[in-house]
Image (spheres, rainbow, N blue to C red):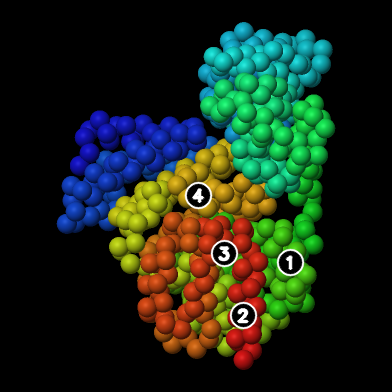
């Protein structure tokens, strides 16, 4: 077992995560050390619950703290949305300098992170003093103030910051320490491009990665010699790259190139802000706002629809984390090509009510029964059935229970199959959740509820990074604004009613459902991204060994976000299934 000091550390981190969601990763690291030590010490009789563990009572108390705090940390979530619109570094602080949100540029350039204090970053102390002095003045003549020539780091790099007083309308009392609406947005006034903007720049002008980086360095005011020194390259190499850049961008010289770069970055930022603003009140042509119906037992079932309301129906069972949301491009293509994607929210997800105390196979059976009721409500006789990642469990179960209403099955990046040997091959964070589910299920409610608090506090990027940090295909996909938006909206769908729905699904993915499919007499297709580190090809092949009728298509360059990044391939598979079921 772990030492007493380690137990104390874990308990401390648990309370810290309950009070300060940004400590979630530190808590999870401590929990990982604890459970691994417990399993190693008792490998012949692994943990089945935490009832006899000294930390169980503290986890229960941590849940009480989270319940009492409620989901009031809306300030940080709104602030997080706001800083993402900044062209360069974006930071939201309160009048004491506490950072409520910081975008990636602020974290990288200024080492300012959510939950820290402005004075802890790389902005020089004099500038921080001037900024905080202004925020605390009661006689401010204007709601904005320009702080020029702030030095950043030891370089030093001169930067300008615009400070603006803001009002966050969904602020809950006490969420930021009782400081009311005294919040301020700091944005750097310089040319900076994040990974997404850089990717679009290279695509727009056909630049190589090196050429794009040199172009941005020119836009930052650096001379060719300074760029050569920074890149450890010869001046002749840099001059050759500059000539290529000017030719590809049709710029008449470096000043003209700077104009193009600034316009490109500002234009993209404005478009992104506009799209996020419009997204709050409208939907793409292929998507409609969520609807709901009342089930026979009085529970509410929420569902989304994408595509053509008169099109060929596809019943979509969502995954555990990323919900019923699809990219705008996917939805619009469904509209154009005549597909109607119907995506019910399972119990505890989105706006759907929990199903009493149902769990395990009983929960799956009741959920697919609810889904059949939805098809009746929509007057749909039969549909192709798509299971997205863990949604494949429900998709297969629907086909087993209602074969006459299932025209074909498509699993995207998953199959309803499990072997214990898979656990050690999972990425680190997924493996920790799997081991918690298997060996210490009593800890799962606190772990997942603390994760919800992190997402509520605007830490969705940190949450996603922990799951996909070692998956290059996933990280590449997240650079695309449409993919990123779908993932974030999917997370919000998952946590809208808390973490109970997610907890109920956790044991299901550690169950082998493949034997149920042996009697199915319908086409089964599996679409798998070769870069998926969670569901590997061995995982898929294990299902095919038990269900030989299944056909696998591998997609190079795709990971867990295949549905969002390679959606045309999903539509290709639906088209093939449509033909096979018709034949």
- Whether residue 198 sits left or right of residue 311 in the image: it is left
Which mark is nearer the camera, 4 or 3? 4
Disc 4 from disc 3: Cα separation? 23 Å
Judge by depth and name the residue closer to the eye, 506 or 190. 190
Disc 2 from disc 3: Cα separation? 21 Å
Name the residue that disc number 3 marks: 318
Disc 2 from disc 1: Cα separation? 16 Å
Name the residue that disc number 1 marks: 333
Q: Earlier in the sequence, mark 2 or mark 4?
A: 4
Q: Is residue 408 above or below residue 428?
A: below
**Dot 3, how many residues are within 10 Å of its Cα: few (below 14), some (14-19), or many (20+)?**
many
Judge by depth and name the residue closer to the eye, 497 or 102. 102
Q: Earlier in the sequence, mark 4 or mark 1?
A: 1
Name the residue that disc number 4 marks: 472
Q: Name the disc covering residue 576, or none.
A: 2
Residue 196, position as x, y percentages in the image: 65, 43
């Amino acid at each position: 077992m772990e030492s007493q000091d380690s137990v104390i550390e874990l308990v401390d981190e648990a309370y810290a995560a309950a009070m300060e969601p940004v400590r979630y990763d530190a808590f999870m690291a401590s929990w990982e050390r604890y459970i691994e030590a417990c399993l190693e010490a008792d490998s012949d009789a692994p943990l089945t619950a935490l009832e006899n563990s000294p930390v169980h009572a503290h986890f229960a108390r941590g849940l009480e703290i989270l319940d009492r705090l409620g989901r009031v940390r809306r300030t940080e979530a709104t602030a997080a949305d706001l800083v993402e619109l900044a062209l360069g570094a974006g930071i939201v602080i309160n009048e004491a300098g506490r950072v409520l949100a910081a975008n990636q540029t602020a974290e990288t350039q200024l080492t300012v992170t959510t939950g820290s204090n402005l004075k802890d970053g790389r902005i020089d102390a004099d500038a921080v003093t001037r900024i905080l002095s202004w925020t605390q003045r009661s006689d401010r003549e204007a709601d904005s103030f320009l702080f020029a020539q702030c030095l950043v780091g030891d370089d030093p790099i001169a930067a300008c910051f615009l400070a603006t007083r803001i009002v966050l309308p969904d602020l809950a009392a006490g969420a930021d320490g009782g400081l009311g609406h005294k919040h301020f947005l700091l944005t750097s006034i310089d040319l900076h491009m994040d990974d997404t903007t850089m990717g679009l720049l290279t695509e727009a002008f056909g630049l190589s990665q090196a050429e794009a980086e040199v172009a941005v360095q020119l836009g930052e005011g650096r001379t060719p010699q300074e760029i050569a020194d920074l890149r450890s390259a010869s001046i002749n190499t840099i001059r050759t790259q500059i000539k290529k850049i000017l030719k590809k961008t049709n710029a008449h010289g470096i000043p003209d190139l700077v104009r193009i770069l600034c316009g490109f970055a500002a234009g993209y930022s404005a478009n992104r802000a506009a799209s996020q603003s419009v997204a709050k009140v409208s939907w793409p042509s292929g998507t409609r706002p969520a609807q709901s119906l009342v089930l026979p037992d009085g529970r509410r079932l929420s569902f989304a629809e994408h595509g053509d309301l008169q099109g060929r129906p596809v019943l979509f069972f969502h995954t555990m984390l990323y919900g019923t949301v699809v990219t705008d491009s996917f939805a619009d293509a469904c509209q154009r090509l005549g597909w109607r994607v119907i995506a019910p929210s399972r119990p505890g997800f989105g706006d759907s009510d929990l199903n009493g105390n149902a769990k395990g196979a009983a929960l799956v059976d009741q959920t697919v029964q609810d889904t059949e009721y939805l098809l009746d409500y929509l007057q749909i006789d039969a549909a192709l059935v798509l299971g997205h990642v863990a949604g494949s469990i429900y998709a297969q179960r629907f086909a087993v229970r209602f074969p006459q209403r299932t025209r074909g099955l498509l699993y995207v990046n998953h199959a309803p199959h499990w072997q214990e040997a898979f656990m050690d091959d999972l990425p680190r964070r997924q493996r920790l959740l799997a081991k918690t589910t298997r060996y210490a299920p009593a800890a799962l409610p606190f772990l997942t509820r603390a994760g919800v608090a992190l997402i509520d506090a605007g830490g969705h990027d940190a949450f996603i990074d922990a799951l996909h940090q070692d998956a290059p295909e996933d990280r590449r996909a997240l650079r695309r604004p449409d993919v990123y938006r779908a993932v974030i909206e999917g997370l919000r769908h998952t946590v809208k009613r808390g973490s109970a729905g997610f907890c109920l699904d956790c044991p299901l993915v550690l169950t082998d459902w493949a034997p149920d499919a042996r009697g199915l007499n319908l086409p089964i297709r599996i679409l798998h991204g070769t870069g998926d580190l969670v569901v590997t090809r061995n995982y898929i092949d294990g299902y095919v060994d038990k269900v030989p009728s299944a056909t696998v298509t591998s997609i190079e360059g795709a990971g867990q976000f295949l549905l969002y990044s390679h959606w045309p391939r999903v539509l290709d598979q639906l088209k093939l299934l449509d033909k096979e079921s018709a034949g």
